[in-house]
Image (tube, rainbow, N blue to C red):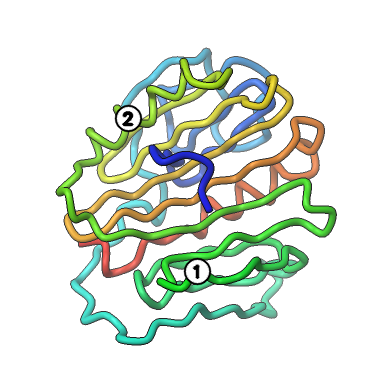
Amino acid sequence: MLRRAVCSGLAVGSVLTAAGCVTLNNPSATTTANPPTVQPSPLPMTTATINPAPGAGVTLTPSTGVKTPTPTLSTPATAATAGYQTYTNRRFGYTVQIPANFTPGDPPANADGLEFSSPDRSASVSLAGENNALNQTVESEYAQAQQLDSQDGTLVTYKVQHGNVFTISGLFGSRQNIFYDEVFVGPRSIIRMEWHYPTAQKPNLDATIQHAVATFVPGAHLS
């Protein structure tokens, strides 16, 4: 289950730090401090429109849907994806690559997504889709996500929105944990990915989350 009802998300290729996140492809948005190593180098924190990252501007076509959706897990054998498993949600059509040693929790009855945890259960990634029954826009979802800045001690250190996707990240849990969210919003559905992990795990998870963001594709059901 996702941590908050007003879920938030990341632009493809952005990575959260213990005190902030970074973007991809010439972002104007920046972090507060100590970002993970990605391209380009981070700038001081602000919000801005950025150029789309490769794979972000995917051309989508309507999906006919699947009556009895079941998740698909596979572990590609290519060098580029060694150490990762691919999760595909057949109900909403989205896909992402996460560490091969992350184990799934119990699948929900509505087959909208799945939560995976690291072997020691200190880190997790939650994936979920939902029908956009209320006709939410990326702007309205982004505005709701930014309200987290004043809730439950959460500190939002990075936020950016481009096209149909936004990223928001920061610290929670007495500032000892990091959340890193990416949300795609389309006319038909909303697709979310949310990472939680201790700040002490940042050096170990920087590359992992960068890879997950780069391979997170919302699917044809979005539009």
Question: Local crowd at mark 1 within 10 Å, few (<14), some, or many (≥20)?
Answer: few
Which numbered circle lies on residue 108? 1
- Image point (24%, 66%), residue name: 60
Question: What residue is at 73 percent from the left and 68 percent from the top?
Answer: 100
Q: Are marks 2 and 1 in contact (CB under 8 Å)?
A: no
Q: Secondary structure at mark 2?
A: helix
User: How dense is the environment of label 2, judged by Cα within 10 Å: few (below 14), some, or many (20 and up)?
Assistant: some
- Image mark for residue 93: none
> What is the x, y in percent for residue 105?
65, 66
State which mark lies toward you, 2 or 1: 1
Q: Earlier in the sequence, mark 2 or mark 1?
A: 1
- Please name the residue that numbered disc 2 is placed on: 144
Q: Residue furthest toward the front?
A: 109
Residue type at the position of mark 2? Gln
- The image quadrant of residue 92 is bottom left
Element type at mark 1: loop
The x, y position of residue 101, in whole percent, is 77, 66
Q: Camera-side residue: 15 or 89? A: 89
Q: Residue furthest right?
A: 120
Q: Position of residue 36 (x, y in %)?
A: 67, 33
Q: Residue at x 70, y 62 (%)?
A: 99
Q: How far apart, in angstroms, are the residues tagged by discs 2 and 1?
A: 25 Å
Is 57 rendered above or below residue 35? below
Q: Amino acid at mark 1?
A: Pro
Residue positioned 23% across, 76% down in the render:
63
Judge whether 10 appears above or below 62 on screen: above
Q: Nearer the viewer, residue 64 or 25?
A: 64
Q: How many marks?
A: 2
Q: Which quarter of the rendering shows the C terminus?
A: bottom left
Q: State whether residue 175 is above or below residue 113.
A: above
